[in-house]
Image (spheres, coloured by chain):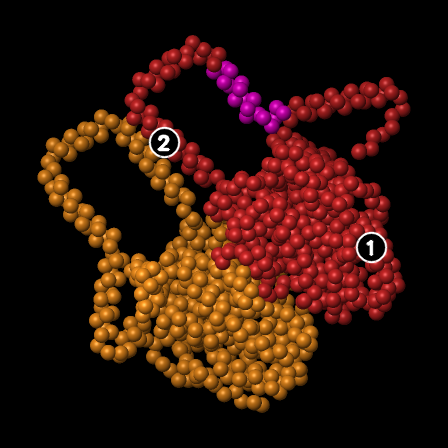
Chain colours: A red, B orange
Amino acid sequence: MPSTRPSTSSKEERAMAASSSRAKLLKSSYQLVVNNFVAVAAVALAASVLRAAWPVSIADLLGWLHAQRPVHVLTAAILTAAVAKLVRARRQREVYLVEYGCFRPRPCFRAPFATCREHVHLLPFLVDEDDIAWGMRLLERSGLGEETCVPYAYHYLPPDSSIAASRDEAELVIFASVDDVLARSGVNPAEIDVVIVNCSIFTPTPVFADMVVRRYGLRADVRSVNLSGMGCSAGLVSVGLARNILQSAPKGTHVLVVSTEILSSQYYVGKERSMLLPNCLFRMGAASMILSNSAERARFRLGRVARTIAAARDAGYRCVFQQEDGEGVTGIRLSEDLVATASQTLKRNIVTFGPLVLPFSEKLLVALSLLKRMLLSGRAKVRLYRPDFRTAFEHFCIHAGGRGVIDEVQGGLGLSDEDVEASRMTLHRFGNTSSSSVLYELAYIEAKGRIRKGDRVWMISFGAGFEANSVAWECVKPASDADGPWADCIHRYPVQVPEGIKGIFT
Amino acid sequence: MSSQETTTTSPATAAAGDDKGRHRPRRRLIKLVYHHAISNAPYLLLFAVTVALALRYHDTTASDLAAARAAVAANLTLAITVLGAASVLATASLARRPRAVYLVDFACYKPGPEHVVTRETFMRQSAATGVFTDENLEFQRRILERSGLGQCTYSPKSMLRSPPTPSSMTEARAEAEAVMFGAIDGVLAKTGVKARDIGIVVVNCSLFNPTPSHSATIVNHYKMRKDVASYNLGGMGCSAGLISIDLAKQLLQVHRNTYALVVSMEIMTMNWYRGNNRSMLMTSCLFRMGGAAVLLSNRGADRRRAKYQLVHTVRTHRGADDRAYRCVIQEEDDAGYVGVALSKDLMAVAGDALKTNITTLGPLVLPISEQLLFLASLIAVKVLKLKNIKPYIPDFKTAFEHFCIHAGGRAVLDTIEKNLELSEWHMEPSRMTLYRWGNTSSSSLWYELAYTEAKGRVRRGDRAWQIAFGSGFKCNSAVWRALRTIDPAKEKGGNPWMDEIHQFPVEVPKVEKVAVA
């Protein structure tokens, strides 16, 4: 609940409440009029026309119609129908999310802080005391809880980075999430026409898409795509790709999208601090979605999609970079200007996305403030109006990249704590599961029963590249049951996560 | 390089040289007449209908025509609305057609002379690593002798230095950048397209997948737009080149008036198997450095200057079958070294996948005459259950003029030559690419097409079939139609064969001795 300033007397309190409710009333009536401007104008026009042309009666109209030759009327009707069909055919197909499923880790995979501390001490040849203390402080302030899960490979000392271990982890998480989505959606594997799998760090031959084809016996003409190296936002990139494919595919096409990050082979066994962060934050997870271009069995409708790539600038390209450190140990280096690059790319993405989704009322206010700034240039630094995205969306799923990142986005967009609760709680319960985190967050909001028909959701994620992706969904059918990755723990959430110092990921 | 020359023959003369008796020419003549009759059946029908109409209306007088014109004038509004409706419907049906995809141009990467690896060099470097047993060195030598590879293939520097120490990610990135940028610079120079005009980038590389991806590297180097639709396909095997083309085709249906850049390559650095499992040794012997960049377009204005139009893509995935899935698999051997193992079932699985692929492709490309024959033989065998009738193999030479078969290895090329009854002339681009460049994985199809162009074989209207197999097990086909005759003298650059095409074709012996140092 947003905190309110304590007032000195009840009279002041009542006056303030009255004025704030008046302001709210003014704002909502402004929004109503401006957003439905066309409807309001049409009603006004129709009323004036009827008033002017009142003497014309229905009988006259019908008589005029009767006087026309039937073949003319018929051709006019056919022509209108043909034009309408042409107009409809030129519009691109709607894309829907039929269902989604997540990997639900069992408690045996848990990595509580005590385990992390113990393991790190048992590998003394890797890091020194200062680094251990730094890492543990990072962990405690990261916003992660005690129930986040790591693969079996991490329970070995040193971690098992073999291909066999990575394949085991991949089969575990991917098959669990695909089993989940197939069971919940009722879609037959033979109906799947396209498989898109994204995993950034680990890419074996044959690839995960082939693994899914084999396990579920998909058809021989299935089109498979495996995206690798595309970072934490690859999940939403896959959604964008699925959308492009579905828009030009025949009706009834189904696309299976699997998002995951396989951690077994990428545990950093070196000393550089800028490369130790992924060890602390990344956790095991996977999520699958089935998308389709027919509304049958659909739960969400896909709205606008915006993708911003900052790779053209060196700072953006190098801010998350997999390379060998000074001693030849491979890891992912996070540069010092990651925060600046991330916020700049996010801002550009939101600037692209905003005009696509904001209602006209907000766009008008932004335009007016832009105009004001242009007219008053030089005299005063006018702050641009920050549009209220809560007029466009009811729920927000911000990639759980780290606590600091969520705070930054919350501050930048002016969101409340309740709006970012899904992100914070997902970071606490599951850690940073990379590209699948936004789906865990959606599962949280549904588990809390907050999504109703017509609610709009904004998923935003960002990652190596550097790129930022935004996707808008609208709920067509709420979840029918409370089953999901949060089923066993939703009653314990939300939790209060202890405050930490400001930093990149803390 | 062996300097034996064979004259380049066209398929007709090559076929006529076959002298299996007097019956052959007569049977061929009958088949030719049948083929032309069926292909031109619609025109014959049209001719017959025109004659009938002429006979029916031959006595129309001027007054009949005047009466018809008066009738139309009386119902002018009706006539206009009918015409309007007809044109609107025609436009609607035309607008719903898939957008044409044109191949504006392509360029293959040609490494510098410092990357050349002869068969002897390869053996010397393998021995210098000190990890292989003598039996396995002998095994590798035997593979090289029968491989069909020549003495001018290319390897990355990390495999050629002395001593051949293990390589690093930095070196792998350097190789990737050299290959990608070399090929892309070539295609952009040839077409004059600016990087800022490219709206779609699809990159495929199987064995090396860094973060950020190769597509991000390209966007960074060429300073592309922030809304470019870039995708990086990893791990998809030797058939990934055609998967990228198919993906670009689908993206071009949705993104209007733009270019798509498709880059196919394979990175050998960090993938040299240093263990002693025999099934994993073959890949190092056959795979070589190479890459290609292809520029596709859906802009109508490019039709005039584009080389080819993409007609069909057919993708087949046999992963549902366990034996096919395990055919090409990357794993650790008993000693913990990572390598790509090829199973003994590879040829059988490839043949199976090919059959499935051409079963789908056949009806799309074969002329009606061949399809009828195939149907007839199918009915005879399956329905009528007649014995002594061999199932008819459709003659794909009636559907395509040029064949680009992924140069996976000599065995694959031999199998396909036999199964599809192709001649030496048809197999020449694939065999010469294997000889000159080795197995460059997904980019080999483009080296083969470049060979076809450099030899001046491509005429306007010719159809080319590209087919590739790879891990998964996947088999993919693409069919291109040439929009103009390609004059090799006018190829500005980016065709890696240009300086040496007169030396080809070369007779590649079945076994070529490799001297042991």
* Chain at numbered mark 2: A
Residue A485 position, x and y percent, is 71, 47
* Chain at numbered mark 1: A
In the picture, measured across the screen, residue A196 lies left or right of residue A19, that is left
Asked if the residue under mark 2 is in contact with the one under mark 1, i.e. CB atoms within 8 Å, the reply is no
In the picture, measured across the screen, residue B81 lies left or right of residue B133, that is left
Pick the residue in front: B331 or A138: B331
Mark 1 packing: few (<14 Cα in 10 Å), some, or many (20+)?
some
Query: What's the magenta region?
Result: A32-49
Label 1: which residue?
A112
Residue B389, placed above or below residue B299? below
Residue B368 position, x and y percent, is 30, 58
Q: Which numbered disc, 1 or 2, marks the residue that appears first in the sequence?
A: 2
C-alpha gap between disc 1 and disc 2: 69 Å
Mark 2 packing: few (<14 Cα in 10 Å), some, or many (20+)?
some
Q: Where on the picture, by quarter, is residue B224?
A: bottom right
Decide whether residue A133 is among the magenta residues: no
Do callouts 1 and 2 point to residues on the same chain? yes
Pick the residue in front: B119 or B330: B330
